[in-house]
Amino acid sequence: MFMGEYQHTLDSKGRLIIPAKLRENLGTSAVMTRGLDNCLFLFPLSEWKLLEVKLKSLPLTKADARQFVRFFFSGATESEFDKQGRITIPQNLRDYSKIDKDVTVIGVSNRVEIWSTELWNEYMSIAEESYEEIAENIVELGI
């Protein structure tokens, strides 16, 4: 399981150190792709394979399903960690996520999310305002 929030910076070659606590559950490589809310998702290979099976089962006849699968898979890349625990974020994913220098890395249960610190701070300030309301609404989902 992934959890926690970590602040890092991207180096001039587009490499990012993934915190050791998160790397332990990722293994030697992971799959990075476009996430939601302009962040990047980083999945261990085992989780990626489970997700891939689920996405393959979506009906090709549904336009939303085709669009989501295209968007999700076209941005995906397998990333290996170097000896310092860094991964390279490809330029197309840096552009999508608006990552330039300051990066926030968070653990979210079965995945790691990589955020531009500026976008993360904006997201959190909005989310904090509605946190209690969201909590009340998810009670209906059995949480």
Image (tube, grey):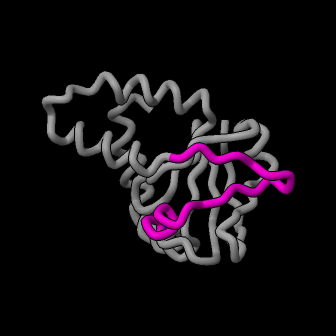
Q: Name the side, left or right, on which 107 lies relative to 11.
A: left
Q: How many marks?
A: 0
Q: Name the side, left or right, on which 31 lies relative to 38.
A: right
Q: Work out which quarter of the rendered image holds the N terminus and state it.
A: top right
| Residue 142 locus on image (x, y percent) | 40, 28
| Residue 71 locus on image (x, y percent) | 33, 49
> Taking 75 as reference, is 97 above or below it?
below
What residue sits 75% from the left and 57% below the top?
Answer: 86
* Span highlighted in magenta in the image: 77-97
Q: Name the side, left or right, on which 119 lies relative to 80.
A: left
> Taking 68 as reference, is 34 above or below it?
below
Residue 64 can be seen, yes or no: yes
- For this rendering, which residue is in front, 137 or 9? 9
Residue 93 in the magenta stretch? The answer is: yes
What residue sits 63% from the left and 65% below the top?
Answer: 104
| Residue 19 locus on image (x, y percent) | 77, 54
Determine which quarter of the picture holds residue 24: top right
| Residue 87 locus on image (x, y percent) | 69, 55
What residue sits 75% from the left and 49% below the top?
Answer: 81
What residue sits 61% from the left and 32% below the top?
Answer: 45
- For this rendering, which residue is in front, 3 or 127? 3
Residue 109 can be seen, yes or no: no
